Amino acid sequence: MALPGAFFRTSWWNKGADFHWARRFDLYKTGENVSIVPWLTGDPGIFTSNLDVARQVVSGSHKTDFNKGAFGTGPLLMWGMNLFAADGDVWRKHRRVVGPAFNNKLYKSVWNQTQMTYNEMLATDQWSTNGQIALPAVQRITFKLTLSVIAVCGFGFSIAWDEPEISEDGSMSVQEALRIVTDNSALAFAPKWVKNLPFKYFRDYRMGQEQLSKFLKEQVIRRRAAILHDEIDASKSDTVFDLLIKARENEEGKYSMNNEELIGNAFIMLFAGHETAAQSLAATLGFLAVHDEIQEEVYQEIKSVLSDHPDPRFEDHTELEKVLAVFYEALRMFPPGHVLIREAAKDTVINVPKPVGQEGTIPIPIPKGFQVMVDMVGIQYNPRYFDEPEKFKPSRWYGTSNESDSFTAFSIGPRACIGRKFATTQAVCFLTLLLRDWVVKPILRDGETKEAWANRVLDASIAANNLPGYRPMFYPLGPPGAFLKSTRWHNGVDMHWVRRFQMYRSGESVSVVPWLGGPSAIYTSNLDVTRQVASGGHKSDFIKSEAASKILLGWGMNLVAADGEVWRRHRRIMGPAFNNDLYKLVWNKTRKIYYEMLATDQWSNRHEVSVSAVQKITFKLALFVIATCGFGISFDWEEPSRSENRAMPIQQAFRIISDTGTFATFAPKWVKRLPFKYIRDSNTAHEQLGKFMRDEVMKRRAQIASGEIDLEGDNLETRTIFNLIMKAGEDEEGKYSLDDEEVIGNVFVMLFAGHETTAHTLAAALGFLAVYDDIQDEVYDQIKSLLSDQTEPTFEDYAKLDKVLAVFYEATRMFPPGHVLIREATKDTVIQVPRPVGEEGTISMPIPKGFQIIVDMVGVQYNPRYFEEPEKFKPSRWHGVSNESEAFTAFSIGPRACLGRKVATTEAVCFLTLLLRDWAVKPILREGETKQAWRDRVLDGAMVITLGVKDVPVTFVRRH
């Protein structure tokens, strides 16, 4: 219940903040009181599920030996002292001021406002014209309802049903601010420096706090002034807030409340009157959805009560006992105030009843400072008080009045929830209206029974997510999680690589729910799910959000980052540049660059050439090929490639940008101004490359406009990607043209995709060939056979070199550069998830708007559903597979598959053919190291912007 345990979920190895829920059926098997003794940090305590013990420690009387203690009030004190957090005389003061506001006049107002809000909901487009409404989360309506009611009845202001989360002036709405603050209430425990971290999650939390604080302060000032100047007659007002202010103004001395206390109580009203009622209503509707007979019984009662009037009246609430009973039973099974924490103010003794069937009590000494946790979940599931507690049985409450002490889910004694009748009035009215007009049914997965649905769905929100998965500290793909590597205690940005052999053991889709910061998501390794979310069609319910492509948007919108119509515009302009003329140019330039490399001192007249990282060769090759074929710029193998009048070589600038992309994207501006070499180099590289690309765009645009560059002739040298894109942009008009920023954005992506990804994959391919002599010999034999009557491979030979291509394909499969595809739901939708291998059919999975699906391309490539023995390097799986085959998915799938795929494979096949014709590749082994040990040590993933391989040390031995 304390830091850091409050942030952890219960698992097989840990009892977390929710352990009394997760263990509700077995926690008290040995007795109604259990000790909790942390072995690392924190104070020991007792959890109790016994009402007699509960009454001893939570009575709230003057003579009690227990108080709430500092910890028991944590998140509730963030706005100021209030009725819920107070204790002793302070609590009595607050109770005296707050109590009179909760009266029949208020409850009648609550009833009327609930009815108005329900009718407002029905008037929306979603409800007014549809006979069936499907909701992936019914909380979407219950939260709106309860906030609207508490806003009017508590504060006298209205919130429209369709109010946007962000207002026109860019500020956060009260509705959204309250949602963020309540959803992240655990941050109340976090130190200030954590809350001030410069990441979106924390910024949103701070903004939510600021908006709520501003709203509450303004309400206090405005309402107090209005009451003092008789603009509002508090004696006639229906709102709780007005009555609180009036009561405060009437009191003097020890019973008056200051502004901070008023704001504290206002927040608690918003929180308790919104969060708890909404969750309980959602649970009620869930239970009714699976218990048709109970729903029908309640409906018949409603029909009977409303037989002579169409709309329910406040006076009807006492006759709607079955409606109240289903709400009570849902509250029993999901008590919102799930634990009451009390601390001994002095050494004392509590009397613990003996087990059921035995009379008498046992005295237990409690030392000063010791905590007793009243487990309200345990009480509600205690068979001493409730027969068959695991069953939803509203009938146990039939005939129970709204004020009965037998109902304990609202706490007990004088400290029982003051807003109890507020909540039940609202619930009875809403449920009566809804069940009068609608039948509630569960959204079942394919082949799922109602019982299975109940087991899957009706679990406490405190337990977070029903889908098995991981609970990292931060969202792995955003700050600060993107800066962290995976370890045995944390799942970071590379979790899907590090855990690739065990991540999907429980299923091909897993949840990733950060417990401190960032959005929840589903990672999937299933291609059918991938096709549903990554298709990019006009009717797709998923988009590639700009936030998911932030690293690639640093230079401007581009083909890889774009979505929807913007993507189609970029694809229309860029597509024609990728044709056979380009691929022939790539082949010829790759061959030319290879011979330039051989002419250097390092290679000429050498029998062996050793390199500590083969990437030194592959990165140069890939950069030079894309520079020549993409931009018409030639570099010398031994000379640094510099932009004009620039100190840093373009090659070095691009290497730095690749290595520092995450930092440059997510680091705040003040960090980028720090005087460290890493940061200075990153800034310089961005400036140099930016200047280079802007200069090239201006120069090429002028050359094409003047006719200096002829793109219509037979000269392949001028038909570079850059020139063709510039020309296409000039030919297009209106919505299909690209501006300079978009051209630069696509230039960067070409440099990046045509350099970084190909270089890493070539390095991996050479690493695998160094380990597996038999595969290298097989590839060499094909090359030798093809070249038996010629000396040089030509572009026309490309299709015949299928074993060379297969090596590159298999290396790409094992190290897919585009390691994740991030998609976001544009609306509430449903995806069909295939059942496990060996089972037919699919499972329907509701996905709420804004939820992320992360296609794990590493997981896809290592999924045994698609690849037999996926952990093995087996190029033979690609023998005979054409370059256009959809069986190869590491370049993505569907219409958004990588446009430069054949550029990469053409370059790779040409280079590997030439290199393996002339040289054998050997690993540089450490003393006593085997090839398998070398593979395990060297051929591991390196996560930068893309997924690559660590430095690959090899020796090239000249063939005779």
Image (cartoon, grey):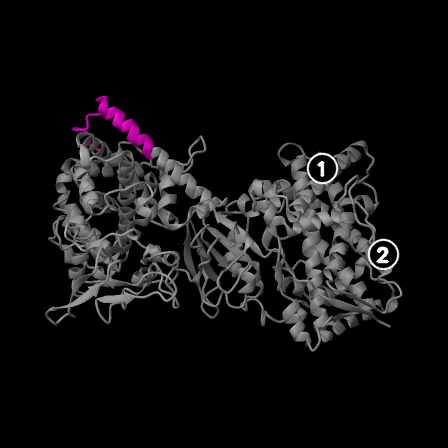
Kind of residue sitting beneath label 1: Arg
Q: Quadrant of the C terminus?
A: bottom right
Residue drawn where x is 20% and y is 44% of the image: 91
Q: Quadrant of the N terminus?
A: bottom left
Kind of residue sitting beneath label 2: Glu
The residue that label 2 is drawn on is 596
Instruction: Work out whether residue 786 can be spotted.
Output: no
Residue drawn where x is 75% and y is 39% of the image: 696
> Whole-Å distance between the Cαs marked 2 and 1?
29 Å
The residue that label 1 is drawn on is 694
What kind of element bears circle 1?
Answer: helix
Rate crowding at label 2 as few (under 14), some (14 to 19) or many (20 or more) other CA atoms within 10 Å.
some
Horizontal side of residue 254 vs 757, given as left or right: left
Quarter of the figure with residue 748 = top right
Whether residue 189 is situated above or below residue 11 in the rendered picture: above
Quarter of the figure with residue 218 = top left
Magenta region, residue range: 216-239
What kind of element bears circle 2?
Answer: helix
Labels 2 & 1 near each other (Cβ < 8 A): no
Task: Provide residue 878's location: percent of width, then percent of height.
Answer: 66, 67
Whether residue 626 is situated above or below residue 953 in the rendered picture: above
- The residue at the far right in this view is 605
Rate crowding at label 1 as few (under 14), some (14 to 19) or many (20 or more) other CA atoms within 10 Å.
some
